[in-house]
């Protein structure tokens, strides 16, 4: 669905110098995949996200979305209909006064006819479990509800890929659960390809594949069990591991025999209480 090859991104620094934000990254994303991208601040993960729907152009290398080259200006319109983005602060992405009006904003701006917009809005709000709030004022929603409305506004445009740039970072635990349940439903039940950029390790557990970034490059890649079982390597890159993986690691240091790839409470209970 997306192919990134030898991608390099260069920024001008305030001092007039040059900084490489991405250093020759290569990555492929398959249709229907749930990819989690991890990395500490400044690792380049948000810069990578902005290349996936041509908000940024490659300095070197290439990014292809469903066969379309993001560096070709003629492809921009098509690419941005295929790849939708949700950002960290939902208040920056919600522009209408009501939930229904906000969800309709995208479909209206790509020129869909009113009857189709009506169906798209209803289906998108139901897909994020916000149908009963369609007449609610946006400013009365919780943080998690606002983020789900932001996702609905993208889903109503029928993208093939949904990119979330730390979309749960400003939410409380309940809001994060609501958004993650929404993402898993869209990915597993409706086949939407998801790229979830996050610093919350427990969210990455649900991904099909994890990419870890540091200083503009990819330093680890694999399934959640493959990546998080390397506790010391993950920590060496300035990240934590899920709480149950950390607990299993500490118990092994004390002589308890446990698998290295425990990720969840349920897996821990099964390992300790067979």
Image: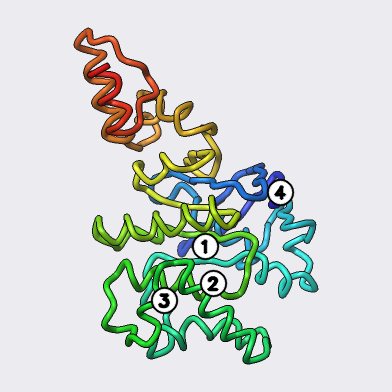
For discs 4 and 3, the disc positioned in front in the rendered view: 3
Q: Is residue 151 visible?
A: yes
Q: Residues within 10 Å of mark 1 (few under 14, many from 20)?
A: few
* Mark 2 touches mark 4? (CB < 8 Å): no
Answer with mark 2 or mark 4, whichever residue precedes in sequence.
Answer: 4
Answer with mark 4 or mark 1, whichever residue precedes in sequence.
Answer: 4
The x and y percentages for residue 35 are 54, 46
The answer to whether 7 appears left or right of 92 in the picture is right
The x and y percentages for residue 40 are 39, 45
Q: Secondary structure at mark 1?
A: loop
Q: Which residue is mark 3?
A: 131
Spatial separation of the CA atoms under disc 4 and disc 1: 32 Å
The answer to whether 232 appears left or right of 164 in the picture is left
Q: Which residue is mark 2?
A: 154
* Mark 3 touches mark 1? (CB < 8 Å): no
- The residue located at (37%, 87%) in the rendering is 135
For discs 3 and 1, the disc positioned in front in the rendered view: 3
Q: Residues within 10 Å of mark 2 (few under 14, many from 20)?
A: many
109 in relation to 58, above or below: below
Q: Secondary structure at mark 4?
A: strand
Q: Which residue is mark 1?
A: 16
Please give the count of numbered marks on the rendered protein. 4
Quadrant of the rendered image containing residue 115 = bottom right
Q: Which residue is mark 4?
A: 3
Q: Residues within 10 Å of mark 3 (few under 14, many from 20)?
A: some
Answer with mark 1 or mark 2, whichever residue precedes in sequence.
Answer: 1
The x and y percentages for residue 26 are 66, 42
Q: Residues within 10 Å of mark 4 (few under 14, many from 20)?
A: some
């Amino acid at each position: 669905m997306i192919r990134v090859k030898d991608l390099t991104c260069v920024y001008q620094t305030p001092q007039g110098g040059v900084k490489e934000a991405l250093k020759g990254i290569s990555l492929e994303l398959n249709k229907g995949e749930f990819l989690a991208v991890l990395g500490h601040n400044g690792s380049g993960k948000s810069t990578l996200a902005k290349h996936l729907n041509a908000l940024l152009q490659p300095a070197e290398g290439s990014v292809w979305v469903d066969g379309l080259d993001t560096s070709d200006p003629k492809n921009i319109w098509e690419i941005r209909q295929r790849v939708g983005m949700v950002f960290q602060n939902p208040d920056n992405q919600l522009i209408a006064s009501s939930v229904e009006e906000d969800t309709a904003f995208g479909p209206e701006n790509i020129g869909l006819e009113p009857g189709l917009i009506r169906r798209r809005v209803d289906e998108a709000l139901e897909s994020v479990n916000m149908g009963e709030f369609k007449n609610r004022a946006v400013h009365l929603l919780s943080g998690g509800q606002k983020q789900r409305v932001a996702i609905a506004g993208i889903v109503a445009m029928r993208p093939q890929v949904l990119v979330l740039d730390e979309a749960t970072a400003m939410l409380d635990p309940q809001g994060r659960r609501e958004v993650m349940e929404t993402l898993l439903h869209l990915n597993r039940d409706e086949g939407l390809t998801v790229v979830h950029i996050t610093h919350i390790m427990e969210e990455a557990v649900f991904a099909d594949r994890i990419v870890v970034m540091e200083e503009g490059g990819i330093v680890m890649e694999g399934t959640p069990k493959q990546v998080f079982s390397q506790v010391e390597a993950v920590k060496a890159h300035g990240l934590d591991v899920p709480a149950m993986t950390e607990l299993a690691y500490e118990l092994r240091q004390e002589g308890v025999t446990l698998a290295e790839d425990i990720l969840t409470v349920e897996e821990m209970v099964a390992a300790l209480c067979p």
